[in-house]
Image: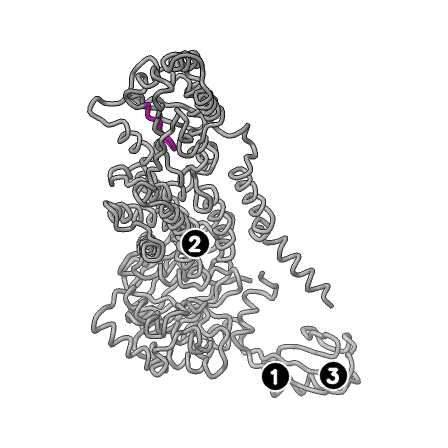
């Protein structure tokens, strides 16, 4: 089932900010990365998807220079990711709010700006920009301990981009925030992308990835399973099949239904390619079987379905 | 309804090994340490008191007295030779003041001649001690000296009395009888305090070397300023380096290490800050001690000594905090472990109970602690007026602890680096 689907052809023609080649890493008996290839181009927003334990975090940490590969290599705008220049070319946005709660928003920005090598006027200008960008200019002198989850998330993001990195590594950047804050964060990220910054976005919110990412990479067991635009992945993986879920007033007799139809109590699920033709036919069959239809839902194939199709439905814990 | 609450509390306790240790083991350990110090548990009687003896007389009679002192099983006598140019009293003062011995006895020049004229002349020996440092030694030595004076050459004493009576001539008059009875009484029950009653021919001239310098009591205050300061220094250092674990828990460490910052620089930054904080904390402590309790902070050479000791102590304490900060996996673990280790080190190392009150074995055991070396160093400065050069053993040990601790912390921190 784990089958690698080809890369987007036009992506290779643009300058690469990130290149990962045959990355391999083992922790004891666990193979975290098993020959991953990945490329992120300038100004590209790439989603990195995978179930728990797929190797996403190891890959992101390796790109940030925090994990040494057993084999393979990673470059950031041509420099090794573990080197000083490589490190400055990327900004890491951890899943946790990696801020000092006893510092103000401005002080947090100052600390991380200095650690990224900024100083003097350049630092002051970038802090002023970041405070406006995050909408925190009027809260700049407040300690972040009192900030809302959304405000912390925005500041968390700003701390990673002060030094204008070529690539921003986003690890679940919208975890635990309300829809309004999520919208705001996505607007900020879009602004970054439009300014030429590349984004590698790790998330479990598949809807987010489908809506925002130009390209999506699905990995599991340390390998790339599929890569492409969301539309390409859906078409390659599931074709044009729509999911249909029909709720009946009673369980149907299984013998009365054709193969490929999944019955669970009063629920009937199946996949159809031509909705206009095949759906009336299915409803007629159910009616003939003596079942009354209470509800019909037609589900367009999405990244969620692709993800489950490629990585399976078993729990990863 | 309260059953689940009690059950949760119970499970929280039994699954937190540090809470268990703090609840049950630490109190028992503390009790045991104090029992050893004050209760004499584990000792076979009181330990012998170390006393230096300087014979300035160099006569057969003074040799007999020294021998008698040596025969006292409660005293551990160290004969101390004297340079021709040195003063016996000055040397005895120096020995006690420096803390080499808790008491020093001087058999003064002319002691033998006076003994020959006993009881026409008072027999005097000099005792130098530091009552604050060892109040027990002072009384023990004074009492035993009286006994040694009598027991050194009893036949000569009797002969002297007879001679004296003959010199006085004839049979004993009532007044003579009364005088002889007085001598007998004072010989039988000598005063340990000031030497003797007026009529006594035996006198122990006692000098308290600290009271003589007008410092009675203040040295004990300075001891506790150092002891308590050093103990809280360790707590402060643990808090200062706890930030490392907090940074790990919030993901900040991951971000920090993805910048230009290396683990070595991160540790160095944390350590330097902690050293500065420790210096400031101890400075405030001693300054307050000087203002409120007369700690002799600005005495001759004290400021330099305090500065050196403070730097050495703060560096070692900061390293201790760094080792704990890099060894522990969570802030809760750090807090529990630090409390246990610091309290035990402080009890053993003299931050709570003065080391001079401890049995010898416990004093030796205490040398494994940071506290003992730091407190001893401060004691040398404030109490002994030791010159800067005399602090080298303490500074060297603390510097050694710092070097080893920094190495260990650096190794432990490797778990946070690239894997």
- Graded by Cα atoms within 10 Å as few (under 14), some (14 to 19) or many (20 or more), the crowding at tag 3 reads many
* Residue B374 x/y as whole percent: 36, 44
Q: Which mark is residue B235?
A: 2
What is the magenta segment's predominant secondary structure?
A: strand
**Disc 1 and disc 2: Cα gap in Å?**
65 Å
* Residue A108 x/y as whole percent: 34, 70
Viewer-proximal residue, B134 or A67? B134
Q: Which residue is mark 1?
A: A298
Residue at horizontal 33%, vertical 71%?
Answer: A107
Does A165 sit left or right of A55 as displayed?
left
**Disc 1 and disc 3: Cα gap in Å?**
15 Å
* Residue A185 x/y as whole percent: 41, 79
Badge 2 sits on which subunit? B
Badge 3 sits on which subunit? A
Q: Which mark is residue B64?
A: none
**Disc 2 and disc 3: Cα gap in Å?**
69 Å
Q: Of circles 1 and 2, which is in front?
A: 2
Query: Which quadrant does the N terminus of chain A fall into?
Result: bottom right
Does B105 sit left or right of B45 as displayed?
left
Viewer-proximal residue, B366 or A252? B366
Provide the secondary structure element on which disc 3 rests.
Answer: strand
Give the image's coloring scheme. Answer: one colour
Viewer-proximal residue, A248 or B383? B383
Provide the secondary structure element on which disc 1 rests.
Answer: strand
**Mark positioned earlier in the residue sequence (1 or 3):** 3
- Graded by Cα atoms within 10 Å as few (under 14), some (14 to 19) or many (20 or more), the crowding at tag 2 reads some
Asked whether the viewer can see residue B134, the reply is yes
Q: Which residue is mark 3?
A: A248
């Amino acid at each position: 089932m784990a089958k690698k689907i080809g890369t987007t052809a036009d992506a290779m023609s643009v300058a690469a900010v990130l290149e990962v080649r045959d990355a391999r890493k083992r922790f004891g008996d666990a193979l975290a990365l098993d020959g991953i290839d990945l490329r992120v181009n300038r100004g590209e927003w790439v989603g990195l998807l995978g179930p728990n334990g797929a190797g996403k975090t190891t890959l992101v940490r390796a790109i940030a220079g925090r994990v040494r590969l057993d084999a393979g290599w990673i470059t950031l705008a041509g420099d090794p990711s573990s080197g000083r220049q490589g490190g400055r070319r990327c900004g890491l946005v951890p899943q946790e709010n990696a801020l000092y709660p006893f510092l103000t928003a401005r002080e947090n920005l100052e600390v991380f700006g200095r650690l990224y090598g900024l100083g003097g006027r350049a630092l002051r200008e970038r802090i002023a920009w970041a405070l406006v960008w995050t909408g925190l200019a009027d809260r700049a002198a407040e300690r972040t301990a009192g900030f809302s989850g959304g405000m912390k998330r925005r500041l968390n993001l700003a701390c990673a981009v002060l030094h204008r990195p070529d690539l921003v590594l986003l690890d679940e950047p919208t975890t635990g925030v309300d829809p309004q804050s999520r919208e705001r964060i996505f607007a900020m990220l879009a602004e970054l992308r439009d300014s030429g910054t590349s984004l590698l976005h790790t998330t479990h919110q598949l809807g987010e990835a489908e809506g925002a990412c130009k390209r999506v990479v699905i990995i599991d067991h340390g390998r790339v399973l599929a890569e492409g635009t969301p539309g390409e992945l859906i078409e390659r993986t599931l074709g044009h099949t729509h999911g249909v879920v029909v709720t009946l007033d009673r369980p149907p007799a299984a013998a009365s239904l054709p193969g490929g139809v999944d019955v669970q109590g009063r629920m009937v699920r199946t996949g159809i390619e031509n909705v206009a033709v095949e759906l009336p036919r299915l409803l007629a069959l159910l009616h003939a079987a003596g079942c009354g239809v209470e509800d019909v839902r037609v589900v367009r194939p999405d990244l969620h379905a692709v993800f489950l199709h490629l990585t399976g439905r078993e729990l990863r814990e | 309804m309260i059953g689940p609450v009690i059950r949760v509390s119970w499970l929280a306790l039994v699954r937190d090994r540090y809470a268990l240790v703090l609840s049950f083991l630490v109190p028992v350990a503390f009790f045991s340490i104090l029992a050893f110090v004050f209760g004499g548990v584990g000792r076979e009687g009181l330990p012998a008191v170390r006393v230096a003896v300087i014979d300035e007389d160099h006569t057969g009679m003074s040799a007999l007295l020294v021998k008698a002192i040596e025969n006292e099983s409660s005293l551990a006598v160290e004969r101390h030779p004297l340079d021709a140019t040195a003063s016996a009293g000055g040397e005895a003062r120096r020995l006690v003041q420096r803390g080499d011995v808790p008491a020093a006895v001087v058999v003064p020049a002319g002691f033998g001649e006076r003994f020959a004229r006993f009881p026409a002349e008072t027999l005097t020996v000099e005792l130098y001690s530091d009552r604050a440092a060892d109040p027990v030694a002072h009384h023990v030595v004074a009492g035993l000296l009286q006994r040694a004076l009598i027991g050194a050459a009893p036949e000569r004493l009797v002969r002297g009395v007879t001679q004296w009576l003959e010199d006085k001539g004839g049979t004993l008059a009532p007044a003579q009888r009364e005088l002889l009875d007085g001598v007998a009484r004072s010989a039988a029950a000598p005063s340990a305090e000031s030497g003797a009653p007026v009529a006594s021919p035996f006198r122990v001239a006692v000098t308290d070397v600290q009271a003589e310098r007008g410092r009675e009591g203040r040295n004990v205050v300075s001891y506790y300023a150092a002891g308590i300061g050093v103990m809280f220094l360790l707590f402060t250092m643990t808090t200062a380096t706890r930030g490392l674990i907090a940074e790990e828990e919030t993901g900040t460490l991951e971000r920090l290490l993805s910048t230009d910052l290396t683990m070595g620089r991160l540790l160095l930054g944390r350590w330097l800050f902690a050293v500065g904080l420790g210096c400031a904390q101890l400075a405030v402590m001693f300054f307050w001690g000087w203002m409120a309790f007369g700690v002799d902070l600005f005495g001759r050479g004290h400021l330099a000594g305090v500065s050196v000791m403070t730097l050495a102590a703060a560096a070692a304490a900061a390293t201790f905090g760094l080792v704990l900060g890099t060894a522990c996996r969570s802030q809760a673990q750090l807090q529990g472990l630090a409390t246990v280790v610091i309290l035990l080190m402080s009890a053993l190392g003299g931050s709570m109970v003065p080391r001079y009150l401890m049995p010898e074995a416990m004093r030796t055991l205490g040398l494994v602690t940071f506290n003992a070396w730091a407190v001893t160093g401060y004691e040398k400065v404030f109490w002994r007026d030791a010159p800067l050069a005399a602090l080298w053993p303490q500074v060297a040990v603390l510097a050694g602890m710092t070097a080893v601790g920094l190495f260990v912390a650096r190794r432990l921190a490797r778990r946070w680096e690239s894997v």
